[in-house]
C-alpha cells in the first residue's frame, strides 16, 4: 500500500512538473504569440492579471522534493527564473549600468515626467510634482477641464487637446494629433510635437492607447466576450500601427505615456520593440506603473530612438491615483 501511494505521488508530481514547464514556456513566449482571435482573451488575462501565481505554483513543487529526479531538481532554478521574468522583475541593461550617470550640473539632459491622472490623481498633486521635480517636460493623460495657467510657472509652455497635455520649459510646436474618432472613441490617443533644444530638435509623442479593461471585466463577471475582444484587439493594433508609422518617419524621436500595453505583449513586440524602453533599460526590481489592491503591471512607458542616451529612469510613488508617474532623464547624442 505504501509503495502504491509513493508511485501515485511520483506520477502526480511528474505530471504537475511537466505542466509547470509548459506553462513557463507559454508565458515566456507571450511576446511572440500569434495573433489568433481565440488567443486574445487568454493573452489579456495572462498579461494584465496578477502574475505572482506562477512563482507560487513553482514553489509548490518543493513540497515533493524527495520524489523529484535529479534532472527535475536541476531544472527547478530555470523555472524559478522564468517565474521572475513573468513577474516582470527587472535588471538594468549592462550598457546602462556601466555608463556615466548624470549630475545636477549637467545642462544637456532632458527630464521628462509622464503621468496618467484619470484614476484619482489630483491637479494639486501635479502641482507639487512639478515644484519638487522641476521637469523639463511633463506629459499628462486623461486630463479634464484643467486650467494650468492658474498655478504653473511662466517658464512652462502648455497645450491640452483631447485629454492629453504637455507642459514644457523647452519650446515646442504641435505637429499633429491622432484622434479616437478613428476607432469610434473620444479624445486623442496621441499628440505629436516638435521639441527644440540647444542640442537639436526632436519629435515627441504623448500616448494614451486603448485599454483591455472591458474584456477583462467581462471575464471576471463570467462572460467570454470574444466579439468585443476581437474589435478591441483590432483597435489596439491599428493605434500601434499609426504611431509606429509616425515614428518611422522621424529622426530623433521619443514616445511616452500610457500605452496600456506591456513589454511582453505581441503587439508591443511587433510595433515598438525596435525602440529603447527607459524603465526596461535602467530600472531594478518590480516597477509597476499601475497598481490595484492586489497586483500591479508596467503599462506606462517612455521609448526612445538610438539618438538619445538614457541617464536614469524611475517610478515615483507620488500620485494617489491608480497610475504612478515615470521620470526619465535623457540626453541627445
Image (tube, grey):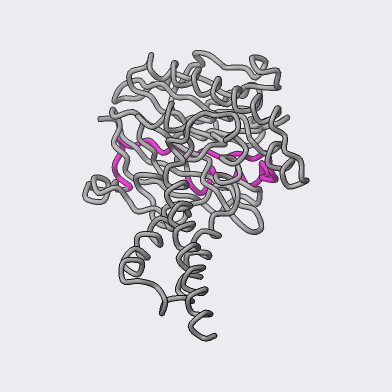
245 in relation to 50, above or below: above
Asked whether 114 or 86 is in front, the reply is 86
329 in relation to 308, above or below: below
Asked whether 242 or 60 is in front, the reply is 60
- Image quadrant for the N terminus? bottom right
281 in relation to 206, above or below: below
- The total of numbered circles placed on residues is 0
Asked whether 38 or 15 is in front, the reply is 15
Q: Position of residue 105 (x, y in %)?
A: 30, 45
Q: Relative to residue 231, is residue 3 drawn left or right?
A: left
Q: Relative to residue 106, is residue 76 drawn left or right?
A: right
Residue placed farthest to the bottom in the image?
Answer: 2
Q: Relative to residue 49, is residue 98 drawn left or right?
A: left
Q: Position of residue 53 (x, y in %)?
A: 55, 60
Q: Residue at 74% x, 40% y: name it.
A: 218
Q: Residue at 41% x, 80% y: name it.
A: 66
Q: Position of residue 228 (x, y in %)?
A: 70, 29
Residue extent of the magenta highlight: 104-133
Check residue 83 for magenta coloring: no
Quadrant assignment, res 277: top left
Q: Residue at 29% x, 41% y: name it.
A: 106
- Image quadrant for the C terminus? top left
Q: Position of residue 89 (x, y in %)?
A: 43, 55
Amino acid at each position: 500500500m505504501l509503495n502504491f501511494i509513493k508511485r501515485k505521488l511520483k506520477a502526480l508530481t511528474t505530471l504537475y512538473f511537466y505542466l509547470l514547464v509548459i506553462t513557463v514556456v507559454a508565458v515566456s513566449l507571450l511576446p511572440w504569440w500569434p495573433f489568433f482571435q481565440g488567443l486574445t482573451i487568454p493573452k489579456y488575462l495572462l498579461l494584465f492579471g496578477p502574475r505572482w501565481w506562477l512563482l507560487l505554483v513553482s514553489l509548490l513543487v518543493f513540497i515533493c522534493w524527495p520524489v523529484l529526479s535529479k534532472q527535475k531538481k536541476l531544472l527547478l532554478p530555470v523555472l524559478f527564473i522564468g517565474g521572475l521574468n513573468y513577474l516582470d522583475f527587472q535588471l538594468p541593461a549592462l550598457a546602462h549600468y556601466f555608463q556615466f550617470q548624470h549630475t545636477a550640473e549637467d545642462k544637456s539632459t532632458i527630464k521628462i515626467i509622464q503621468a496618467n491622472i484619470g484614476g484619482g490623481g489630483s491637479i494639486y498633486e501635479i502641482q507639487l510634482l512639478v515644484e519638487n521635480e522641476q521637469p523639463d517636460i511633463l506629459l499628462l493623460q486623461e486630463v479634464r477641464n484643467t486650467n494650468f495657467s492658474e498655478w504653473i510657472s511662466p517658464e512652462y509652455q502648455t497645450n491640452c487637446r483631447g485629454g492629453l497635455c504637455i507642459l514644457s520649459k523647452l519650446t515646442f510646436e504641435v505637429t499633429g494629433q491622432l484622434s479616437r474618432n478613428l476607432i469610434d472613441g473620444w479624445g486623442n490617443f496621441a499628440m505629436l510635437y516638435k521639441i527644440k533644444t540647444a542640442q537639436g530638435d526632436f519629435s515627441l509623442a504623448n500616448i494614451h492607447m486603448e485599454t483591455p479593461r472591458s474584456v477583462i471585466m467581462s471575464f471576471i463577471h463570467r462572460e467570454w466576450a470574444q466579439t468585443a475582444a476581437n474589435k478591441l484587439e483590432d483597435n489596439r493594433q491599428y493605434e500601434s500601427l499609426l504611431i509606429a508609422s509616425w515614428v518611422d518617419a522621424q529622426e530623433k524621436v521619443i514616445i511616452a505615456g500610457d500605452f496600456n500595453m506591456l513589454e511582453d505583449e505581441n503587439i508591443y513586440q511587433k510595433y515598438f520593440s525596435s525602440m529603447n524602453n527607459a524603465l526596461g533599460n535602467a530600472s531594478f526590481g518590480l516597477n509597476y506603473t499601475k497598481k490595484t489592491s492586489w497586483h500591479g503591471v508596467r503599462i506606462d512607458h517612455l521609448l526612445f530612438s538610438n539618438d538619445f542616451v538614457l541617464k536614469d529612469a524611475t517610478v515615483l510613488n507620488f500620485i494617489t491615483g491608480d497610475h504612478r508617474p515615470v521620470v526619465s532623464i535623457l540626453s541627445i547624442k
